[in-house]
Image (cartoon, helix red, strand yellow):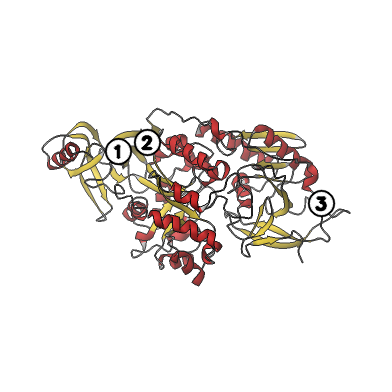
Amino acid sequence: MTKAQLKKRIDVAAGRCPADVVIKNAKVVDVFGGVISKGDIAIADGCVAGVGAYDGVIVHDAQGRFAAPGFIDSHIHIESAYVTPEEIGRLLVPCGTTTIVADPHEIVNIKGLAALEYMLKAAEHTVLDIKYMLPSCVPATSFEHAGATMTAQDIQQALQDKRLLGLAEFMDFPGVVHATDSALDRLLAAHHAGVPIDGHSPGLSSAALSAYVAAGISTDHECTTVKEMHSRISRGMYILMRQGSACHNLARLLEGVTPENSSRCLLCSDDRQPKTILEQGHLDDHLRICVRHGIDPVTAIRMATLNAANCYGLSDRGAIAPGLRADIVLLDNLDDFRVAQVFAAGNLVANEGVYLPEVTRHDSSAMQSSMHVKDFTQDKLKLELKHNRVHVIDILPGEVATGKGVTQVQLSEDGDFIYNSRVDIVKIAVVERHQNTGNVAVALLRGYGIKAGAVALCVAHDSHNIITAGTNDADMAFAVQSLIAQGGGVVLVKDGQVLESMPLPIGGIMSDQSGQWVDAKLNALHEIAHKALGIHGDVEPLMTLCFMALPVIPQLKLTDMGLFDVTAFDFITVQAP
């Protein structure tokens, strides 16, 4: 800021000169004092100069609407919406979101630091202020093959880039608790850079949780119970209460919010698909849930704004007050939080659900060509079991966590699994697609509900290898081969035919099309998955499957290297004792 700009801001605040922009006749939500007051909001050079009675060059009449600070999503993976940063801005800003704290570890696990630079450049093409955290775990664990590896030295060097806000969710929680050299070196890189460290500690408690927090990790978005929430707040953590497309933890955690601890509670979506955004909204939807569950509206808004700003050191935003960024949302009421208009840095950027800026895109050609699969054949999907007692990955409805089941299945003479339509167990496989290793791991999945054909996709958190599940090897193999030929994305097959597909050319996980295009494709995929393939109606067929490869959330998961017991943090055999 120049001396002239500072003088102008002071003069506008004092009423000595007109503001650049004035939002008149607003009910201003004061998240500092917890009150609502009537007044005009004066804006100079993109910042709030004052709240009171003002005149300006450009005047917007709020018509008595509530003016709240722009919403801040405290943790989101853009890639999980299958769209680019430019497109996520077009989708989220009309919902009142003006800032997101994004972790690009999905695309960075595929393309490394080149992908991070792409995401940073693409973010320049949207008025949504995208604050990126540097991925901490590439790959997430040493028990899988990703497309890239980031060492502690890489992290230390990357954190010199002031465009990065901090170190993203530290998923290797066993490494932290056991103080491994690898974890310590990565943590120290963040400490030396003086940046916040996001957490990921599902199931940790007691001394192990204290060890994790003692490492300097300040947040967690993996709480699913009030007990877990309170145990972390008591240790000084911020709780990012998640409401995504797959994980719906917000309502349950709101039972644990009190006047005493609400300042440690934030709102986040983690993973939110276009379908959910277009039909339900974003943080405006979170706010509706908060109020329905008895949270005071101003407290709820504070959790979506000021608390997130405080957590991440964003001292220039999170409230409507002199000197802060003029990120402002005009709401019809504080019940359904319908967003009428959105201002980013003082500019009107969304009106009645329409994103106003022209959408331009950064070149994504360097992020394509991401399928490197060696010697895949149908024979690699065979199991060779000695007896019929097996471990199965149990799907838990509405959760990314899974159970560790043991059951008996029917086997062929050579020990391969035989699908039985009366039993909800099918094969699941992960095919390595980054390094031409030729790795294919096969296990058994229960609770998916598929009764015909196969699903294959290369959106498989966090290394994003190919994952497939189906009732027979032939369709599973055809699905994998079709996906490779397509260059990534999603395919549904039955009887050797592709029923529907969604190409995702950017890293194999993101589309270069609009959110509406992605939504239409997802709707078609979901309908066919449920009707033609028979997947359970209460199972999200794609996001559920893509989390079956995530070896940092309990209990059983499958990587390209084998069946992984997250609790024991080691591989186990499909064959049960």
Q: Which amino acid does label 3 sit on?
A: Ile
Asked which secondary structure carries label 1, the reply is loop
Mark 2 lies on residue: 127
Mark 3 lies on residue: 418
- Report whether 279 appears left or right of 333: right
The crowding category of the residue bearing disc 3, from other C-alpha atoms within 10 Å (few below 14, some 14 to 19, many at least 20), is some
Is residue 223 visible in the rendered image? The answer is no
Asked which secondary structure carries label 3, the reply is loop
Disc 1 + disc 2, Cβ < 8 Å? yes
| Numbered circle sitting on residue 280 | none
Q: Nearer the viewer, mark 3 or mark 2?
A: 2
Q: What residue type is labelled 2?
A: Val
Q: Which amino acid does label 1 sit on?
A: Ala
In the rendered image, residue 3, in percent from the top left (x then y), is placed at 17, 39
In the rendered image, residue 572, in percent from the top left (x then y), is placed at 71, 61
Q: Distance between the residues labelled 1 and 2?
A: 9 Å
Q: Which residue lies furthest to the left in this view?
A: 16
Q: How far apart are marks 1 and 3 (CA)?
A: 60 Å
The crowding category of the residue bearing disc 1, from other C-alpha atoms within 10 Å (few below 14, some 14 to 19, many at least 20), is many
Q: Distance between the residues labelled 3 and 2?
A: 53 Å
In the rendered image, residue 561, in percent from the top left (x then y), is placed at 69, 53
- Report whether 78 appears left or right of 387: left
Q: Which of marks 1 and 3 is in front?
A: 1
> On the image, which quarter does residue 519 sit in?
top right
Which is nearer the eye, 337 or 381?
A: 381
Disc with the residue nearer the chain's start (1 vs 2): 2
Is residue 65 visible in the rendered image? The answer is yes
The quadrant the C terminus occupies is bottom right
Mark 1 lies on residue: 345
Which is nearer the eye, 197 or 255?
A: 197
Disc 3 + disc 2, Cβ < 8 Å? no
